[in-house]
Image (cartoon, rainbow, N blue to C red):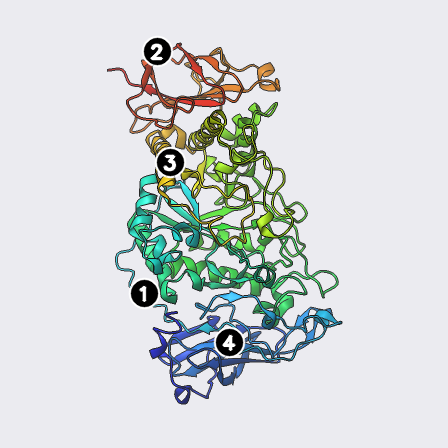
Amino acid sequence: MRVAAAAAHLHPTEAQLPDTCEPGRPCPLGATLDARGVNFAVYSSVADKVEVCLFDRTGTREVRRLALPCRTGDVWHGLVPGLPAGTRYGLRVQGPYQPAQGLRCNPHKLLLDPHARALDRPLRGGAWQYGYTLGGPARDLAMDTVDNAAGAAKCVVLDTAFDWGDDRRPGTPMADTVFYEVHVRGFTRLMDEVPQALRGTFAGLASAPALAHFKRLGVTAVELLPVHAFNDERRLIDLGLANYWGYNSVAFFAPEPRYCADGDPDDFKRMVKALHAAGIEVILDVVYNHSCEGNHLGPTLFLKGIDNASYYRLAQDRRYYDDVTGTGNTLDTSHPATLRLVMDSLRYWVEDMHVDGFRFDLAPAIARNAAYDFDHRSPFLAAVAQDPVLRQVKLVAEPWDIGDNGFQVGGFPPGWSEWNGRYRDAVREFWRGTDGAVQEFAARLAGSADIYAPSRRGPTASINLVTVHDGFTLADLVSYNDKHNEANAEDNRDGESHNRSWNCGVEGETDDEEILALRERQKRNFLATLFCSRGVPLLLGGDEMGRTQAGNNNAYCQDNPVSWFDWSEARRQDPLLDFTQAMVALRRELPVLRDDRWTTGQPDEADRRDLGWYSVWGLPMTEEEWTNPAVRCVAALFDGRFTPVDGLPSPSVLLLFNASDEAVIFTLPEIGALAEWRVRVDTGQGHFPHAEAERVEPLARIELESHAMAVLVEGRAQ
């Protein structure tokens, strides 16, 4: 690793390591390098002493232990003069070990600095991580006194200076954004054009072949699964698995070492710089709702051993944790220390690492107040709302957790967008032919005004998604009715069981040509719907090439070809790739699909509607048709006269949907002064939408195959 090897020349010899610690200052927290040395500052309201331990070049032998000499409030601090970048260090906290009272200090365990900017190695779970004696009758009530420093991961003092040159944020308006959710390691792990040493790294994601793929698709932002350093759980390691997704954070400022080419943390900055140069924003999926330390029987790696009761929400019986995340613990962002940790981390990634926004995992968990209620005035949401740095970036909530009142789709305040789980469910139900799905489908296609308008937000509050990392891929959504997670070694109990999927007649692989054709049509239907909906589309990386996980809908522990992108020639030549690129381009071409204003559907003085809904007869949908559970066809007409560009109407768009089992003939609705329609997309006819499309007269009749949709764009009079 570069931190461990190439930077070793910066590491002092043992004789050169300072053995003194001056008072220093309490701010900022963490290890801060300046001309005098390194200032250390650590928050702990329960510690009797906080020590900084310095290690040799290998990071295995402790050679200095320096007590931080000053305490200002609850911050322990000290300056180690002359200490250079590259130094490995850890913390020891002496204080009470009384788990029944929520106190878990154990000076025998080396701890990571919560504000560490870099780690010297990836973390892999082992017995050394636990603060109590594993297998003992008292369980976590008995402190383990075996020193673990030799095998523990170390923090690294980092010189954060970096030549950003002329780096500029793309600043893509939310209405024009197309998110692409992607895993840093999985994207290039099997990409032959990327040098072997760079595959699966930030450098790999910024390589020319990777950038070419993003540019070809036309996506404007990559949304990266967690890149904060994380821990592989001991249970997974014992099973021969790994925590692939990374929702198990251990360092909120440090990039995951295994993603850093040659172990260099600056690899992340170079990636951001390259993506920005290509006009692509970088959005981080961040996990501030919990940590990797688990419940009362989990490991002790940082917060638990520093100040357990301040950083975590504890149950009434303070030995245990309040868990609204399903991971064993919940970070207490209503406590000033935890809130400061989270806010410092967010600002660091924006100001020092130049990221363009965040997607917050299980966001209600961090937006709860001291009484554990989701609250617009919770400390976290209030802090973000007033922060001048964070107000400039994209903020996206995953708006649910597993606590009381945890489903908060539509519940976040202005300034936030949300993953719209109701959009996902409605679109899936419609295209699998569920009775009574058309009304909900229409509301989601139009931007979900019923969900977001009450909070004075526009359609861009809705991040529209059909598939994401946790769940079926698009190919699997149309190929499996049931999950197949046996490889996760949990007897197929993990993962969502109600997927709203449809296998089109056969579970999994088949050579039946009719079923295969239907599956391809369904993929096109989902993609065309996604890119023709008001709101902001999110594309799951790999769906454009038919990526499959063989029915595994919870591949969090599959760091292998199950999850990695398949860059074989067959996948590269999948016509779905061209179709996806064309749909992204079509969305970019048509302002009426990206309008961030709500439609009313009400006639103006000229009897025009910004959005009209029509039956197959070309007549406005009646209440009886909306509520008829057998109706599976509908047409939506977005009138471009309500979305002018440079004072001129933009092209109108007519969408035809047939989710029935039979071909249907649509009579096109009337729209005043229309010269002609051009059929730009017909998912029943193939993969290739294009500008030189079939021309159709107003009020014409069009036959649409079963399970298909069409996109018609207004043609201008010559």
Q: CA distance from mark 3 to mark 2?
A: 33 Å
| Contact check, label 4 and label 2, Cβ < 8 Å | no
> Could you say which disc has been placed on residue 574 in the image?
3
- Which circle's residue, 3 or 2, is located before the other in the chain? 3
> Could you say which disc has been placed on residue 90 in the image?
4
Any part of residue 551 in sight: yes
> Could you say which disc has been placed on residue 697 in the image?
2
Going by the numbered disc 3, the residue's amino acid type is: Asp
x and y percentages locating residue 693 in the rendered image: 31, 20
Q: Quadrant of residue 118?
A: bottom left
- Check the image and report above or below for 26 versus 348: below
Q: Is residue 279 left or right of residue 406?
A: left
Question: Quadrant of the image for the N terminus?
Answer: bottom left
Q: CA distance from mark 4 to mark 2?
A: 73 Å
Going by the numbered disc 4, the residue's amino acid type is: Gly
- Check the image and report above or below for 612 versus 313: above
x and y percentages locating residue 530 in the rendered image: 45, 33
Q: Is residue 578 left or right of residue 123?
A: left
- Callout 3: SS: loop
Question: Of discs 3 and 2, which sits in the foreground?
Answer: 3
> Could you say which disc has been placed on residue 162 in the image?
1
Q: CA distance from mark 2 to mark 1?
A: 59 Å
Q: CA distance from mark 4 to mark 3?
A: 50 Å
Q: CA distance from mark 4 to mark 1?
A: 25 Å
